[in-house]
Image (spheres, rainbow, N blue to C red):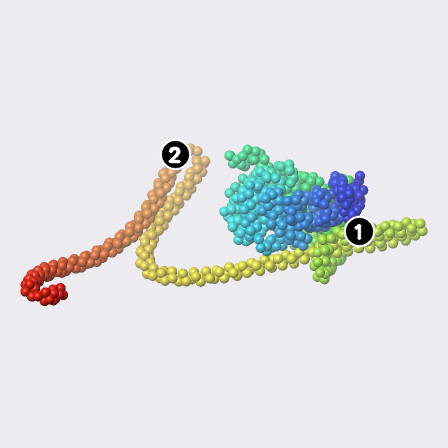
């Protein structure tokens, strides 16, 4: 079954399934999808024709429908994922068919079940689809996709974590709108902590993904300055070079190289890399990868080397490593096999630069760009002689690339690739021609016929692109053709003095009317270099008699009018939602217009058949009119398509500016709060400093006396410095004597050549002078060492003396304080002794009084006893009553 029949059956199955979503129709559609997948018809599917476009649009609609079975959706995604690595197909899926938005919508519909195989499949395809491609901020469900990724980076499934991190790294890279949206999220700090925790993960792929995201989000912020500071950046360099050289899979190597390329754009990190001590060894091992048979690996390595060449110091290092003679460069002790693998990387570059056109175009384009950088460094450093032999080999191989491909074997795709490679080759030759000797080599090996055939091919190809359907890819390719034509003419202008035939061909091409298109495109370009090249060519062409200056002026005016009309239409554009809708479904409109054009062509053909029966001779003129109208409608449609893309870009830019404004406003509020807290802290610190200032003022008086001592010590040091100057003068005198002795030695050697008879005596004298010189040098070195030792001894003794003096002063102060304490204690001791004597005297007097009182008590007791006896006598004489009274009185 051919491709056209298979696509028609697929389109019919899609329509049947959309009309009736039965299991039978779903199985039939899945069978047709599998048939298309087995045909490998990527070139036909993305050719822009009506039938393939209808099939792709229908597949997108079926896959994006939440009611579609997961098995059928997975089959459609598997079919389209086959083309995610192809450049043109990838661009068409991303921009024209909105495959990114469809996959994001599928993930959003299944966000509650992230363990589904369909979700993981969509994440993996999205990662491949968005790699090195900028995702527009207006893609449907992009915000929900970012929220899903931020939420599920902590999943228990390692495959989901790896896919989420890889997709997040793609979305964040070089996309300010996505970065601003992520930074505006409330859980961004937790997301940062999660990424930092991933840096210690056992899988290097996860580590590289996390580093890539952190560099995109935080490189110019406080978190990034802590992560990529001088202490940690060397570990990052070592990790990147280890992954690049030893490899942890092609995917990990690509992301590691991209991370280093992004980091090198920061001047501070580029400076850190120049100071990396293992850079030479790492560079040697990286250059060894150029001998790999894997084109993707070699292309990524050359991309890394081109990025290194953006730093002047690193470009010099790369140039020396690549263009140096093929000698063993590695130190002993390194690993075996690296030396042979890293030998002669220049030959590997020539091999990749001359690889076939049917291979990956990035491989030979990166090789040619790297060679241009290396020769630019060689010419700027004025050291082109070592690279002379390599330049001869390179020119012998590279100049073959400028020859036109075989028309019988070359397709339109090969012609496009030839155009791109020819532009890089001409850039390389323009760099080489900046040196006079290398320009002479180019003039010997390059023939005018090659340049003429190159320009003729590109001019005819550019005319074919201009006359065909005016799509965006054709417009860009036409611009590339025009640029290559002007660069080739500039090369011919450089070589016309060395090659007379080249001058004739150069002026003949300038008078061709087809040169109007390249000159007008370059003069109205936004690129400064293109305008300068066009002006140089125009200055050469303007004095020529047959130069089409009027047509050039009309073409420039038409381009300017088109730009002005495009700007006016963009200003008068309708609402933003209509722009987004039109941007998301441009292919539907283009397919509808194509269908209308096809119907018109069918009507014209039917009309032509009817008119053939009548034999109308003016039918050809009517067909010409209709063809002109159709071409005008096609051009108008393409311009409207460009306007819609410009409107969508303007809308995305507005969203990006709004997100930036919100982010900046939040940062300003945070900074205001931080400044308020800093103000409070400064006030508190001011009060503390005021108290410290009062303390310091008290210490100033103490320091005055110390400063006087320091001045005296400074005077002593000045005397030592004077002695040092004197010694230096004597040393200079000895050096002068040494220079004089060397002059005498040279004179003696000259006399030795002229006077052969006195040779032996002069040799002995010379030997004696040498011995005396050695003795004087040895004595001088000994004296210098003695002087240095004496100086160090003097300094140490002065330091010890100052320390001893300080200790002596402190000890004297302590002794003085102790003496004062002793005198005070003695006075207190005398006072206590006097008080003791007084108390002893008082005690003796009290004892005397006690004895006297005891004597009185004894006397009174004797008298009392006498009174008692008298009472008893009276009691015996008196009556009982009287006795009771007396007893009572006595008791009282």
Residue 456 appearing in the image: no
Along the viewing direction, whichever of 704 and 386 lies nearer the viewer: 704
Q: Is residue 251 above or below residue 95?
A: above
Instruction: Using the rendered view, name the quadrant where residue 849 is placed.
Output: bottom left
**Which residue is at a point 34% across and 47% down the rendered structure image?**
791
- Work out how far the residue at label 1 is from the one at label 2, CA to CA, in angstroms: 104 Å
Q: Quadrant of the C terminus?
A: bottom left
For residue 522, side relative to residue 741 (left or right)? right
Instruction: In the displayed orientation, state which residue is furthest to the front.
Output: 880
- Residue 318 appears at what percent x and percent y? 57, 43
Along the viewing direction, whichever of 707 and 111 lies nearer the viewer: 111
Disc ID at residue 764: 2
Along the viewing direction, whichever of 93 and 604 lies nearer the viewer: 93
**Which residue is at a point 72% across and 53% down the rendered structure image?**
584
- Residue 675 appears at what percent x and percent y? 50, 61
Label 1 Cα neighbours within 10 Å, binned few <14 / some 14-19 / many ≥20: some
Could you say whether the residue bearing mark 2 is in a helix, strand or loop? Answer: helix
Label 2 Cα neighbours within 10 Å, binned few <14 / some 14-19 / many ≥20: few
Along the viewing direction, whichever of 785 and 628 lies nearer the viewer: 628
Instruction: Using the rendered view, name the quadrant where residue 326 is placed.
Output: top right
* Mark nearer the N terminus (1 vs 2): 1
Q: Single out the mark in the foreground, 1 or 2.
A: 1
- Residue 469 appears at what percent x and percent y? 77, 51
Residue for badge 1: 594
**Which residue is at a point 18% across and 57% down the rendered structure image?**
829
Instruction: In the displayed orientation, state which residue is furthest to the right.
Output: 614
Could you say whether the residue bearing mark 1 is in a helix, strand or loop? Answer: helix
Q: Quadrant of the N terminus?
A: top right
Residue 643 appearing in the image: yes
For residue 88, side relative to residue 872 (left or right)? right
């Amino acid at each position: 079954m051919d491709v056209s029949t298979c696509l028609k059956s697929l389109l019919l199955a899609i329509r049947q399934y959309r009309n009736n979503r039965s299991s039978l129709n779903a199985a039939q559609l899945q069978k047709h999808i599998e048939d298309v997948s087995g045909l490998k018809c990527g070139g036909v599917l993305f050719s822009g024709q009506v039938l393939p476009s209808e099939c792709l649009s229908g597949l997108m609609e079926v896959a994006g429908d939440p009611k579609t079975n997961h098995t059928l959706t997975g089959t459609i995604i598997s079919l389209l994922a086959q083309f995610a690595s192809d450049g043109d197909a990838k661009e068409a899926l991303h921009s024209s068919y909105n495959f990114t938005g469809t996959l994001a919508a599928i993930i959003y519909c299944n966000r509650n079940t992230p363990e589904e195989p369909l979700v993981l499949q969509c994440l993996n395809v999205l990662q491949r689809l968005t790699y090195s491609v900028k995702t527009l901020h207006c893609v449907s469900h992009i915000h929900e996709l970012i929220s899903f990724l931020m939420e599920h980076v902590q999943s228990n499934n390692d495959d989901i974590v790896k896919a989420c991190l890889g997709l997040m790294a793609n979305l964040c890279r070089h996309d300010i709108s996505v970065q601003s949206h992520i930074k505006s999220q409330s859980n961004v700090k937790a997301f940062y902590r999660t990424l930092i925790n991933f840096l210690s993960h056992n899988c290097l792929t996860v580590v590289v993904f996390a580093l890539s995201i952190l560099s995109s989000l935080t490189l110019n912020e406080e978190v990034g300055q802590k992560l990529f500071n001088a202490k940690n950046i060397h570990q990052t360099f070592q990790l990147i070079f280890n992954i690049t050289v030893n490899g942890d899979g092609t995917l990990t190597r690509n992301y590691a190289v991209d991370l280093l390329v992004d980091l090198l754009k920061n001047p501070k990190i580029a400076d850190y890399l120049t100071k990396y001590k293992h850079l030479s060894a790492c560079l040697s091992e990286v250059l060894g990868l150029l001998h790999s048979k894997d084109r993707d690996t070699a292309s990524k390595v050359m991309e890394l080397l081109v990025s290194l060449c953006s730093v002047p110091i690193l470009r010099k290092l790369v140039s020396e490593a690549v263009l140096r003679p093929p000698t063993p460069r590695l130190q002993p002790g390194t690993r075996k096999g690296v030396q042979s693998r890293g030998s002669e990387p220049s030959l590997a570059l020539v091999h990749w630069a001359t690889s076939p056109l049917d291979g990956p175009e990035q491989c030979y384009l990166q090789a040619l760009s790297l060679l241009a950088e290396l020769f630019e460094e060689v010419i700027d450093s004025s050291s082109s002689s070592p690279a002379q032999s390599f330049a001869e080999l390179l020119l012998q191989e590279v100049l073959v690339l400028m020859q036109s491909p075989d028309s019988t074997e070359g397709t339109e795709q090969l012609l496009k690739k030839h155009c791109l490679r020819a532009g890089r080759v001409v850039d390389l030759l323009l760099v080489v021609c900046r040196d006079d000797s290398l320009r002479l080599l180019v003039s010997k090996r390059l023939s005018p016929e090659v340049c003429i055939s190159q320009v003729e091919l590109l001019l005819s190809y550019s005319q074919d692109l201009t006359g065909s359907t005016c799509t965006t890819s054709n417009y860009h390719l036409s611009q590339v053709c025009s640029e290559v034509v002007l660069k080739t003419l500039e090369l011919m202008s450089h070589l016309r003095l060395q090659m007379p035939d080249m001058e004739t061909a150069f002026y003949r091409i300038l008078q061709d009317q087809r040169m109007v298109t390249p000159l007008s495109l370059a003069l109205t370009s936004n690129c400064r270099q293109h305008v300068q090249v066009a002006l140089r060519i125009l200055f050469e062409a303007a004095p020529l008699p047959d130069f089409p200056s009027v047509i050039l002026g009309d073409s420039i005016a038409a381009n300017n009018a088109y730009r002005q009309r495009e700007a006016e239409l963009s200003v008068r554009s309708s609402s933003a939602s209509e722009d987004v809708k039109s941007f998301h479904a441009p292919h539907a409109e283009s397919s509808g217009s194509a269908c209308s054009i096809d119907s018109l062509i069918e009507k014209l053909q039917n009309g032509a058949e009817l008119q053939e029966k009548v034999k109308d001779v003016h039918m050809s003129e009517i067909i010409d009119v209709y063809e002109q109208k159709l071409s005008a409608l096609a051009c108008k449609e393409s311009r409207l398509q460009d306007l819609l893309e410009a409107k969508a870009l303007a809308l995305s830019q507005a969203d990006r500016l709004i997100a930036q404004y919100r982010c900046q406003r939040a940062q300003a509020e945070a900074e205001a709060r931080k400044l308020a807290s800093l103000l409070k802290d400064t006030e508190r610190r001011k009060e503390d400093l005021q108290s410290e200032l009062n303390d310091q003022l008290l210490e100033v008086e103490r320091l005055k006396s110390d400063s006087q001592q320091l001045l005296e010590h400074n005077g002593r040091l000045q005397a030592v410095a004077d002695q040092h100057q004197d010694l230096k003068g004597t040393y200079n005198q000895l050096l002068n004597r040494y220079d004089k002795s060397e002059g005498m030695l040279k004179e003696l050697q000259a006399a030795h050549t002229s006077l052969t008879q006195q040779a032996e005596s002069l040799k002995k004298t010379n030997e004696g002078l040498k011995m005396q010189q050695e003795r004087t040098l040895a004595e001088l070195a000994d004296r210098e060492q003695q002087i240095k030792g004496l100086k160090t001894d003097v300094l140490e003794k002065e330091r010890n003396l100052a320390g001893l003096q300080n200790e002596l002063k402190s000890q004297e102060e302590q002794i003085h304080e102790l003496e004062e304490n002793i005198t005070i204690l003695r006075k207190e001791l005398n006072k206590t002794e006097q008080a003791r004597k007084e108390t002893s005297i008082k005690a003796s007097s009290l004892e005397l009084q006690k004895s006297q009182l005891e004597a009185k008590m004894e006397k009174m007791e004797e008298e009392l006893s006498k009174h008692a006896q008298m009472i008893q006598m009276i009691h015996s004489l008196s009556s009982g009553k009287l006795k009771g009274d007396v007893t009572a009185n006595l008791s009282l």
